[in-house]
C-alpha cells in the first residue's frame, strides 16, 4: 500500500501520522481498493482487511485506532484511555456525533475517514497532544479546526504557538463547485468564480481559521493535492458518487 505523511511532522519520531491512499487494498469496485470506511456499503470483511494492511504498514495494532461517527458538525471529543479501540473494527462502536478528536494518551491513533473532505491533523510537541478534524464544508462553517485547537488549549494547556497542523489531500478549489446556498454562508475571499460557477476553497478557509487561532503560518502545511483531480490515488465522493474512504491518522507512540 501507499500512504503519505506530512513533511512538517516527520521530525517527530514519537509520532505516527499518515494519509492513506486507495492503493494496495482488497476491496472491489467501486470501493477499490483500500477502502477504510465501515459506513460504506462495501463488504465489512474487506474493510477490516484493509485496516489491517494499513496498521501493519504503520506498525501499529488495529485496536489502537479510534474512529468517530462523523456527522459534519463542530463537536470535538477528548479521547481517553477508556476509548481505546472504539470504531477500530466496526462502525457501531465508534465515538458518536463527533468530527474532531484530541488526546494525550499514547498508543491511541485518531483516524478520520474522508472522500474529498479535508482531514486536518494537529500536534503539540511540547505537551505531547494530538488532534484531528474532519472538515467538510458544514464542519468548516462550525469552525471544527478552531474547536480542536480550543480543546487542546482548554484541556491540555497547549499554546497555539507550539501547535503544528497538516491539511490532507482533499477536494480543491479547482473542482469543488458549490451552489449559491453554500456560497452565501462563506466569506467571498474563499470562493473562486469561473464560467459563472462558484468553487469553494476549503483548504484556505481552514488555513485562515487555524491562523486566526494563533497558530504560526509556517506551522501549517497544506498538502494542496486535490482528491477529485487525483481520484486514481484518493476516493472522491464528488467525482465518483458511491465510493470508499481514505484515512487521515495521527497518534503518539509509547
Ligand atoms: Zn481538482
Image (cartoon, rainbow, N blue to C red):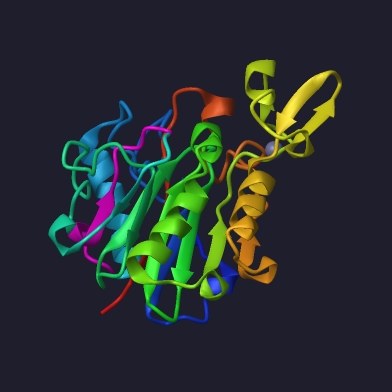
Q: Position of residue 98 (x, y in %)?
A: 33, 41
Q: Nearer the viewer, residue 164 or 45?
A: 164
Q: Is residue 14 above or below residue 120?
A: below
> Number of marks in the image?
0
Furthest residue to the right? 195
**Whether residue 189 is situated above or below residue 49 in the rendered picture:** above
**Residue 23 on the magenta segment:** no
Identify the residue at image location x=61%, y=48%.
Answer: 206
Q: Residue furthest left?
A: 82
Where is residue 99 drawn, in percent x and y?
39, 43
Give the residues drawn in magenta, as a range.
Answer: 60-72
Relative placement, left or right, of 23 versus 107 is right
Question: Which quadrant of the picture is home to ligand 1?
Answer: top right
Q: Position of residue 173 (x, y in %)?
A: 72, 38
Q: Nearer the viewer, residue 11 or 232?
A: 11
Q: Residue at left 44%, top 30%?
A: 243
Residue 156 visible in the snapshot: yes
Of residues 250 and 230, the one drawn nearer to the viewer in this rendering: 250
Q: Tell me: residue 203, above or below residue 141.
A: below
Q: Position of residue 18 (x, y in %)?
A: 45, 61
Residue displayed at 45% across by 78% down: 125
Q: Is residue 13 left or right of residue 79?
A: right
Image quarter in which the N terminus is found: bottom left
**Left or right of residue 174: residue 65:** left
Amino acid at each position: 500500500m501507499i500512504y503519505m505523511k506530512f513533511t512538517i511532522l516527520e521530525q517527530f519520531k514519537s509520532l505516527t501520522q499518515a494519509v492513506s491512499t486507495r492503493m494496495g487494498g482488497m476491496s472491489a469496485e467501486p470501493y477499490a481498493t483500500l477502502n477504510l470506511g465501515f459506513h460504506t456499503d462495501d463488504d465489512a470483511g474487506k474493510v477490516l482487511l484493509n485496516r489491517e494492511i494499513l496498521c501493519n504498514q504503520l506498525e501499529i495494532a488495529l485496536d489502537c485506532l479510534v474512529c468517530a461517527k462523523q456527522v459534519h458538525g463542530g463537536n470535538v471529543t477528548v479521547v481517553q484511555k477508556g476509548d481505546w479501540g472504539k470504531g477500530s473494527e466496526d462502525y457501531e462502536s465508534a465515538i458518536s456525533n463527533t468530527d474532531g478528536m484530541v488526546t494525550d494518551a499514547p498508543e491511541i491513533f485518531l483516524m478520520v475517514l474522508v472522500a474529498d473532505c479535508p482531514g486536518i491533523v494537529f500536534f503539540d510537541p511540547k505537551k505531547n497532544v494530538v488532534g484531528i478534524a474532519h472538515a467538510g464544508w458544514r464542519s468548516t462553517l462550525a469552525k471544527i479546526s478552531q474547536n480542536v485547537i480550543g480543546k487542546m488549549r482548554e484541556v491540555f494547556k497547549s499554546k497555539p504557538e507550539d501547535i503544528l497542523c497538516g491539511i490532507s489531500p482533499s477536494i480543491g478549489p479547482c473542482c469543488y463547485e458549490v451552489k449559491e446556498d453554500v456560497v452565501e454562508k462563506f466569506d467571498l475571499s474563499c470562493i473562486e468564480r469561473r464560467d459563472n460557477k462558484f468553487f469553494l476553497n476549503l483548504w484556505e478557509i481552514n488555513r485562515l481559521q487555524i491562523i486566526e487561532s494563533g497558530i504560526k503560518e509556517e506551522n501549517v502545511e497544506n498538502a494542496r493535492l486535490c482528491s477529485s483531480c487525483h481520484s486514481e490515488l484518493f476516493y472522491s465522493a464528488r467525482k465518483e458518487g458511491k465510493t470508499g474512504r481514505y484515512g487521515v491518522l495521527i497518534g503518539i507512540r509509547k
